[in-house]
Image: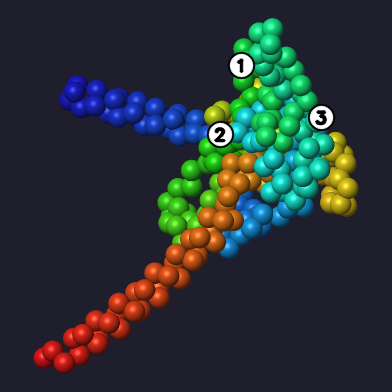
């Protein structure tokens, strides 16, 4: 009998630990899927949106987040001309060298250069951001996403859902709010129920309504800014997505035609065999 009660106690402790672990699962709220222009097998980038997202990145996000894997010349994919790309690159300073004296020096960037990081090293980045190093934007849209459980992930196979990263980014940027009553967050952090690693993060709300001026008449709201910069991050992570989808469609058409020819050949070869 004593062992029976010990077993019940252990079982109760197990349920308590399981409940505690379940309660600590993040994010507290799952991002809502958004109808992106690049969704699905035939989706394409909206170049106007990408240019707006790039503007948000330049005026807001680039103060903390690097874009190490993107070169200035890649901006031609966004619809910029060669002259515009050269002008954009010239606004940045990059380190070069050594020169004839063996010293490093700085010069205006060229289209072949990559975007220079905002900090000299990770230690400087952490010291400027409450001890947290801001992640690089180059692949973030593909690297950060909330896992979609059963049965949702089964439908994702057929819909070719691959926008989990941008859905998460949009939700995170628009999801800052005051902590619920009774919830305490660590000092220097900000409550966000969409954060994938906890109840709060070191990054303060980075953007708000009216912070960036658009030239094309798009709404200058937090929601629009978040959509645009998320789309830009998707392009940075997968700049050749449109070509990949076009190639995939061509391959599928070829396989269907090839399968039909194989079937007809089989019928012809075995037609007189009894």
| Few, some or many residues within 10 Å of mark 1 (<14, 14–19, 20+) | some
Q: Nearer the viewer, mark 1 or mark 3?
A: 3
**In the rendered image, is residue 249 in sight?**
yes
Q: Earlier in the sequence, mark 2 or mark 1?
A: 1
Residue at mark 2 to residue at mark 3: CA–CA distance? 35 Å
| Few, some or many residues within 10 Å of mark 2 (<14, 14–19, 20+) | many
Per the image, the residue denoted by label 3 is 91
Q: Nearer the viewer, residue 119 or 173?
A: 119
Q: Earlier in the sequence, mark 2 or mark 3?
A: 3
266 sits left or right of 107 in the view:
left
Residue at the image position 67 percent from the left and 34 percent from the top: 112
Q: Are marks 1 and 3 in contact (CB under 8 Å)?
A: no
Residue 57: x %, y % from top left: 74, 36
Q: Are marks 2 and 3 in contact (CB under 8 Å)?
A: no
Residue at the image position 78 percent from the left and 37 percent from the top: 86
Residue at mark 1 to residue at mark 3: CA–CA distance? 24 Å
Per the image, the residue denoted by label 1 is 122
Q: The residue tagged with tag 1: helix, strand or loop?
A: helix
Q: Nearer the viewer, mark 2 or mark 3?
A: 3
32 sits left or right of 57 in the view:
left
Which quadrant does the C terminus fall into?
bottom left
- In the image, residue 204 sits, relative to residue 219, either above or below, namely above
- In the image, residue 238 sits, relative to residue 268, either above or below, namely above
Per the image, the residue denoted by label 2 is 196
- In the image, residue 259 sits, relative to residue 209, either above or below, namely below
């Amino acid at each position: 009998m004593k062992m029976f009660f010990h077993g019940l106690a252990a079982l109760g402790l197990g349920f308590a630990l399981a409940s505690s672990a379940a309660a600590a699962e993040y994010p507290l709220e799952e991002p809502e899927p958004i109808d992106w222009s690049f969704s699905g097998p035939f989706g394409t980038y909206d170049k106007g949106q990408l240019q707006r997202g790039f503007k948000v990145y330049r005026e807001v996000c680039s103060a903390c987040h690097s874009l190490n894997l993107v070169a200035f010349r890649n901006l031609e994919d966004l619809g910029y001309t060669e002259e515009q790309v050269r002008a954009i690159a010239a606004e940045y300073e990059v380190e070069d060298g050594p020169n004839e004296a063996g010293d490093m020096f700085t010069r205006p960037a060229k289209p072949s250069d990559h975007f220079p990081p905002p900090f000299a090293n990770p230690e400087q980045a952490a010291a400027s951001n409450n001890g947290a190093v801001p992640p690089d934007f180059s692949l973030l849209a593909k690297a950060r996403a909330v896992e979609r459980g059963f049965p949702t992930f089964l439908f994702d196979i057929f819909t070719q859902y691959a926008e989990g990263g941008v859905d998460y980014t949009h939700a995170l940027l628009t999801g800052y709010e005051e902590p619920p009553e009774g919830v305490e967050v660590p000092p220097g952090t900000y409550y966000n129920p969409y954060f994938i690693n906890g109840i709060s993060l070191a990054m303060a709300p980075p953007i708000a309504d009216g912070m960036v001026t658009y030239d094309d008449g798009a709404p200058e709201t937090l929601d629009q800014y978040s959509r645009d910069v998320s789309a830009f991050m998707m392009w940075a992570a997968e700049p050749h997505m449109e070509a990949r989808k076009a190639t995939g469609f061509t391959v599928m058409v070829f396989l269907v035609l090839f399968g039909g020819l194989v079937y007809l050949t089989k019928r012809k070869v075995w037609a007189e065999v009894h």
